[in-house]
């Protein structure tokens, strides 16, 4: 006797379209997903001072103090500042174009690409913020200070080489501009201002 159930064929599932569906799902995922781009503030930290060495004395006139309160108010050298004028104030401070006595001193540095001896500012911008400072204000202040340095570099590059700093291709020339206009921004641990 033949078993009737054994003869019965089991219907197959047509899986030929599974590859197409998988491909469509993958394409949908790639088109709708945003890739996370690295963001941040690119700065090179100075080398640490050896513990046996005394940190150098810095004159008061060579420091521009920028403090951000928990209410996102800006204090520049203990007076109320404005984010809209911060870049221009930082530029004037770092360049000291008229050699004023209340602005930073300058030192002579040998930079062959800029014709030998070149005056470099000793100015340092000291940035402090409160633990309650908003991220948006912190980034806005960082942006303004970076713009000040970038504009000074562009101006010097145009004067010396006829093109903005961002258009320079020669690493020697770029390095010379960076030495002449260093990023002198010191950032301290957040504090609590009242």
Image (cartoon, helix red, strand yellow):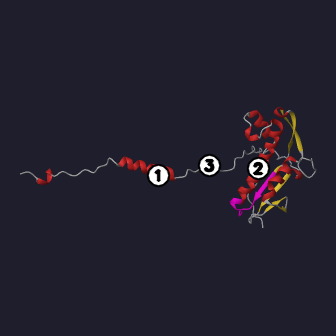
- Tell me which numbered mark, 3 or 2, is placed earlier along the sequence: 3
- Nearer the observer: mark 3 or 2; the answer is 2
Residue positioned 74% across, 62% down in the render: 130
Q: Earlier in the sequence, mark 1 or mark 3?
A: 1
Residue density around tag 2, few if under 14, some if 14–19, many if 20 or more, within 10 Å: some
Whether residue 26 is in magenta: the answer is no
Nearer-N-terminus badge (1/2): 1
Task: Give yes or no for contact between labels 1 and 2 (Cβ–Cβ under 8 Å).
Answer: no
Q: CA distance from mark 3 to mark 2?
A: 20 Å
Say whether residue 174 is left or right of residue 1: right
- Residue 118: % across, % down: 87, 37
Question: Residue 49's x, y, as percent?
Answer: 77, 45
The residue tagged 3 is: 38
- The residue nearer to you, when weighing 72 against 128, is 72
In percent of width and height, residue 161 lies at 80, 35
Residue 101 at x, y percent in the picture: 94, 50
Q: Nearer the viewer, residue 164 or 91?
A: 164
- Which label sits on residue 147? 2
In magenta, the rendered stretch is 125-136
Query: What residue do we see at 73% from left, 34% from top?
Result: 171
Residue at the disc numbered 1 = 28
Q: Residue at x 39, y 50 (%)?
A: 21
Could you tell me which secondary element the residue under label 2 belongs to? helix
Closer mark to the observer between disc 1 and disc 3: 1
Quadrant housing the C terminus: bottom right
């Amino acid at each position: 006797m033949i078993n009737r159930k054994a003869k019965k064929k089991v219907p197959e599932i047509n899986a030929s379209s599974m590859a197409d569906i998988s491909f469509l799902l993958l394409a949908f995922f790639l088109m709708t997903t945003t890739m996370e781009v690295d963001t941040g503030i690119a700065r090179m930290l100075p080398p640490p001072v050896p513990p046996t060495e005394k940190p150098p004395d810095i004159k008061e006139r060579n420091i521009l103090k920028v403090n951000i309160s928990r209410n996102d108010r800006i204090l520049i050298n203990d007076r109320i500042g404005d984010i809209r004028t911060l870049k221009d104030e930082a530029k004037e401070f770092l360049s000291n174009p008229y050699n004023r006595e209340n602005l930073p001193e300058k030192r002579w540095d040998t930079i062959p690409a800029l014709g030998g001896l070149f005056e470099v500012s000793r100015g340092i911008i000291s940035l402090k913020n409160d633990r309650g400072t908003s991220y948006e204000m912190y980034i806005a202040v960082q942006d303004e200070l970076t713009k000040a340095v970038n504009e000074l570099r562009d101006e010097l590059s145009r004067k010396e080489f006829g093109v903005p700093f961002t258009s320079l291709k020669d690493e020697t020339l770029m390095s010379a501009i960076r030495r002449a206009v260093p990023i002198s921004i010191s950032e301290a641990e957040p504090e609590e201002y009242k």
